[in-house]
Image (cartoon, helix red, strand yellow):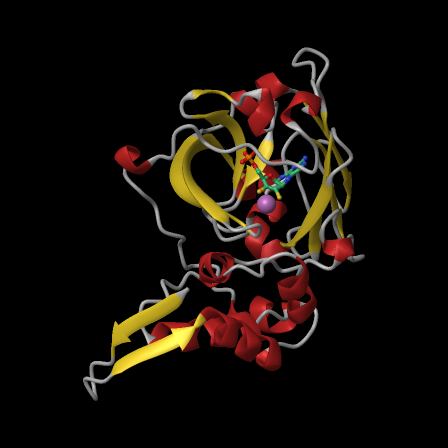
């Protein structure tokens, strides 16, 4: 694949090759970003998605390299701006059908019973520790049309609805000064996020997809939707949440994916 674009300043035609870009990226990267690049996202499209750059000019290639070389948890946490919103989109741009993804096939999606479902809270929480689906549905609901970016090299725009996670954490009496929120799922998947991300205005305790009850494949009965985070940080089928100061890791994070996982 060859990238061609006009350099505005010199008017010169620039040509660069994907292979050399990836070589440069590898040279610039520190682990774990380099490990991640080697393992999962060798495609240029994946790199472009991950960095949010369109790669139409040398400048945007450089921006991409710079962004990827910042794939370091501390730097990313510092760069995270709690007031910066991820882009939102019109209904006409929703990807249909929205892709399914998990560490298993669609036939193995867990079945969670709505009637017996209880969301368990543990750790640094002073208030209510067990929530039913009806109680979550009775809280103020919001919706968002945002882009989900998967590290495997695809992205899709979807429509999710539910309760602002910050509102839920406040009502539940969670310690909002704690470092981490860990999310445990019915399929034994888990991930964890930093408190500023948990409190971000677009972080949604999600109960619906496209106006209907969240279907099993997209995480029934509840998923956490964060447009500021990559796909693997958006856990489906959440059954337990813990508030903690001890680093909880995650299913993919423990296999070398970047913990901060910002999009
Ligand atoms: N419980 C659970 N949540 C999960 C996963 C999983 O395997 N199990 N996969 C993650 C990944 S890598 C992606 S890209 C998204 C896919 O969500 P979707 O099926 O709604 O597209 O779910 C994320 N959350
Ligand atoms: Mo993903």
| Residue 250 spot, x, y in % from top left | 74, 49
Q: With 251 as the anchor, is 47 left or right in this view?
A: left
The image quadrant where one finds the N terminus is bottom left
Name the residue at the top extreme: 115
Name the residue at the front extreme: 1
Which of 254 and 101 lies nearest the eye of the viewer? 101
How many numbered circles does the render carry? 0
- Above or below residue 202? Residue 259 is below
- Above or below residue 127? Residue 217 is above
| Residue 166 spot, x, y in % from top left | 54, 44
Q: Quadrant of residue 259?
A: bottom right
Q: Quadrant of residue 119?
A: top right
Identified at 54% across, 21% down, the residue is 215
Name the residue at the bottom extreme: 10
Which of 171 and 78 lies nearest the eye of the viewer? 78
| Residue 46 spot, x, y in % from top left | 51, 57
Q: Quadrant of residue 159?
A: top left
Q: With 37 as the anchor, is 16 left or right in this view?
A: left
Identified at 56% across, 28% down, the residue is 218
Does residue 237 appear in the picture of this structure? yes
Does residue 148 appear in the picture of this structure? no
| Residue 73 spot, x, y in % from top left | 64, 68
Q: With 257 as the anchor, is 87 left or right in this view?
A: left
Q: With 88 as the anchor, is 139 left or right in this view?
A: right
Identified at 49% across, 47% down, the residue is 154
- Above or below residue 108? Residue 247 is below
Which of 104 and 147 lies nearest the eye of the viewer? 104
Q: In terms of image quarters, where does ligand 1 lie?
A: top right
Identified at 78% across, 57% down, the residue is 247
């Amino acid at each position: 694949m060859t990238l061609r674009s006009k350099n505005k300043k010199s008017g010169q035609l620039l040509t660069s090759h994907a292979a050399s870009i990836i070589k440069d990226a590898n040279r610039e990267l520190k682990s774990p970003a380099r490990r991640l690049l080697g393992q999962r996202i060798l495609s240029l499209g994946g790199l472009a998605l991950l960095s949010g750059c369109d790669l139409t000019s040398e400048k945007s290639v450089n921006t991409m390299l710079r962004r990827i070389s910042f794939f370091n948890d501390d730097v990313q946490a510092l760069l995270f701006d709690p007031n910066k919103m991820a882009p939102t989109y019109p209904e006409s741009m929703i990807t249909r059908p929205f892709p399914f993804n998990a560490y298993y096939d669609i036939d193995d999606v867990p079945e969670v019973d709505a009637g017996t479902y209880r969301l368990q809270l543990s750790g640094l929480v002073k208030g209510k520790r067990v929530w039913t689906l009806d109680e979550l549905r009775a809280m103020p609901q919001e919706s968002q049309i945002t882009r989900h970016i998967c590290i495997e090299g695809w992205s899709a725009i979807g429509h999710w609805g539910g309760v602002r996670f910050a509102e839920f954490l406040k009502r539940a009496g969670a310690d909002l000064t704690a470092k981490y929120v860990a999310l445990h799922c019915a399929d034994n998947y888990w991930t964890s996020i930093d408190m500023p991300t948990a409190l971000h205005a677009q972080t949604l305790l999600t109960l619906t997809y496209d106006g209907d009850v969240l279907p099993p494949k997209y995480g029934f009965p509840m998923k956490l939707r964060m447009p500021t985070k990559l796909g693997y940080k958006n856990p489906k089928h959440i059954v337990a949440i813990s508030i903690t100061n001890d680093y909880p890791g995650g299913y993919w994070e423990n296999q070398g994916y970047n913990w901060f996982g910002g999009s």
